Image: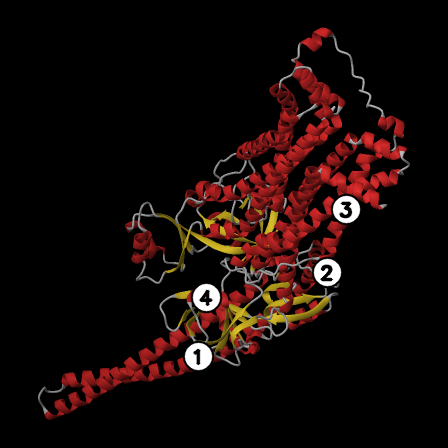
Amino acid sequence: MKKTQFKDAYRNILKQIVSYLSILVIALIGAASFMSVHFASLAMSKYCNSVYDDMNYRTIEVIATKLLNEDDLDALKQLDGFVDIEPVWQVTASATVNDSEESYSVTIITLCERINTPILLEGCMPSGIGECVIESRLADKYDIKVGDVLSGMSMEDAMGEYYEQPEELKVTGIVIHPDHLSLNLDEGYYVMVNKESFDMEALRNCCVRADILLDTGNVTDRFSEAHKELTNDIVHEIENLAEIRTPLRDQQVIEIANEQIDEYKAAYNTDLDKQMIIKHDLESRRADLDKEAESIKFAEERLAVLTPGSEEYLAAKRELDSSRASYNEKLTALEEEETDNDEKIKTIQNMLDYLEEQRSSLDEMEPDSWIVLDEYGSPSFVQLAIGANNLSKLESTFAAMFIVISALVIYATVSKIIDEQRYLVGTSKAMGLYNREILAKYLIFGVTSTMIGLIAGILIARFAMETIAIKGYNDYFIVDFNKPILDVPSTLAVLAAGILLSVGAVIIACYRLIREPATVLMAPPVPKGTKKKSKSQRSNLPLYTRLIWRNIRTDWKRVLVTVVSVGGCCALIVTGITLKNAVESSPAHQYGEIVDYDLKAKVFTGNEDILDPIFDEAGTSYTALYDNNIIINAGRTDIAELMCGNLSEINRFFHLNDWKTGEPLTGADDGILIPRRMAEVYELDIGSEMLITVNVTEVRKVRVAGVFENYIGSAVAMSDTYYQSLFGAKAEPDTYFVSLNGTDENELFARFADTWEVKSWSAADADRSIFDKSTEVINSVVVLFIVMAAIMAGVVLLNLTMIYVIQKTREMTVMRINGFTTKQVISYAARESIATTLIGIILGIAVGSVMAYRIVRAVENTYGQFDRNVSLTSWLIAAIITILFAVIVNIIALRRVKKLNLTDI
């Protein structure tokens, strides 16, 4: 371009400075909105992946209900894609610190050398028996320091018989474990010890689980769909392998059990033989005593014929008394030995019978099964994935709307500017300028404003908005998210896309006009013909209405772009407020309509006769139930909380209402009840089947008997009857739901101060803080987007209104000459603006409501359902904001009417 052309382009920018700045601001808002969420999502993914990689976090975890033997591990190693596999041993226990009275539940787990390696924060790793390291979560909660002693170890599962550590463990270090990166999930606590703490000989080198590290090739993002698909393929391979290995393990277990039974029987038979020899000896001694009894009887008969008091009588009596004493002493000793011998023989016979019963029951033994978990088997990983995915979904939906609206505004602005400058374009053509040279002027206008806005928006996103978007995650994850990143490839891509979008919008806006010959462009525009209406039809409408209707028909493209632009901004506000209300309303629904108790008490089983009277005396309402985490598998493995007991009683405290009818699902004795969100995620309905794993080892196929409404958490429920039909035994209550009924909480705690039956207390809304924290970032981003959408609405309205006023300057000047007052002219100009704004608001409300529903559904997860109802509040607020900006903008723009003069014609 020549220097004069640059000057002309520069003057054009100054002349249209409001439109130029509008495009700049809108491009800034669009880029800042999109890139802030994009950078935040990348930052989460990058640093979480980095932490997991530093600790060699396992890709897959395999748990066997009958342990994994060395052959199982070798078979797993043969599968494609395996980098490493490491066995793990663990046992659940309760412990105290430094002989205190407060006990807590922990998982004693072996330290891994290559996979799932913890990060040492303080102290050193254990070097031998009697030492351990603990998680920082446990140390912080119970104020445990390096050098403290964990005592009172009490094993709580079958693996306890193989645990050989002393009852006291010295804490040598504090660590972070990759299984538990979340600070607000009640996942239990790890106490890590060396492998030598378990009796490997007794275990025959079998392990509880195996941690597996896969070769994922170029797929390095653990949260990506590609990574999930890759691991799913391996999971299916392992499940197929399990179908081969588990029958072999069953056979091996039966053989080992038969060997042990034979060993025990041989030992008991040896003992039985010894006892039978003893019994035979006792029978011989009984025969000898019987002979002594006959001798005593003969002596008594002889004594009876002797003269009492004679010397012979006294000698015979002394001899008889001595014989009787000796006989009685021998008889008592013999009877004791006979009783003991009979009891031992009976015990041995009972044990032999029991061993035979055990041998018979081997054929009915529960078959072995493998539970295969990918990274999503860890609740902490799931929360991190949800956080990253929520940001990604906001990026691809909410933020993308800003980009679309920005493109529309650029098109509308440039098209109206060039339309107003048609005479100037014609003159330029007449003077010999090429189309490309004329187009360059408007490209400079559109592209430079867009580029400056994009660069400013990216910088704001990187140094301000990204930090706001991710800072909330620092409150509940042991990961440092305060390290914003600038992703160069995506930044360049956005710059290129923004520039191309701007170029495209300018070319489309200019294409028709610059192709016209100079003579046409320099001539006054010819009004377009319209369908003629009868006089009666025209007279039915007021003058201003007829004029506005004429303008809309003759310049419908401008009106359409205006309506769409205003509607888009309004839709953004509706979407943002609806999403914010949807997130914030969920806890109100959960703890106002579903959860109807105040406290949850975790207790030791079998103590209802002790606990119930205390609750009664305190004036509380309560119900006892079994409440524990289980593993579910309905196409994908996940974690759920099982509530089991009398469903009518549970329903008093946790309402199990059908999500469609609202009726209580208290009569479901033929299946499990699941929450609505779980049914949606796994495509389940009444009659569907899925697998559940209780106590890690007991796997059952269950039928879905009902779907209830639930917003927070992943609770499922089943009746005692159904549980017993599945597992052959009643579920032992380990939890109480308690309604205080006005009782002081501290007073209730005091009543239980002298009992050891209660493990812990938690508020009914304990999960609320988890939900609030996990949605805090969504709220922060949404509030930010609402503010930016409001600013965009103001800028769009100002820009389009200024363009409209400039376009109508000639017409409004003629109206003033023809005697219309300033007020009438302003009224005429404002009415079309008001009409298009109102239509845009209606369109925005409709589109925003649909978009909001889609985004709400997109950011929901298995553990959280948002309020999906239409938000009338968002409609009202969006309409008020748009109207307020419209009024302010019209006041600013229509001030030009007072300054109209003849030179404007």
Q: Secondary structure at mark 2?
A: loop
Q: Judge left or right: residue 311 versus residue 749.
A: left
- The residue shown at (63%, 23%) is 826
User: Along the line of sight, which residue is nearer the eye, 406 or 392?
Assistant: 406
Q: x and y percent of residue 717 in the render?
A: 50, 47
Calculate the distance from the C-alpha at mark 3 to the C-alpha at mark 4: 52 Å
Residue tagged 4: 140
Dot 4, crowdedness within 10 Å: few (<14), some or many (≥20)? few
Is residue 641 visible to the viewer in this orientation of the structure? Answer: yes
Identity of the amino acid at label 1? Answer: Met
Dot 1, crowdedness within 10 Å: few (<14), some or many (≥20)? some
Q: Secondary structure at mark 1?
A: helix
Q: x and y percent of residue 461 in the render?
A: 64, 52
Q: Which mark is residue 499?
A: 3
Residue tagged 1: 276
- The residue shown at (10%, 87%) is 307
Observer-side mark, 3 or 2, equals 3
Q: 653 above or below 358?
A: above
Residue tagged 2: 219
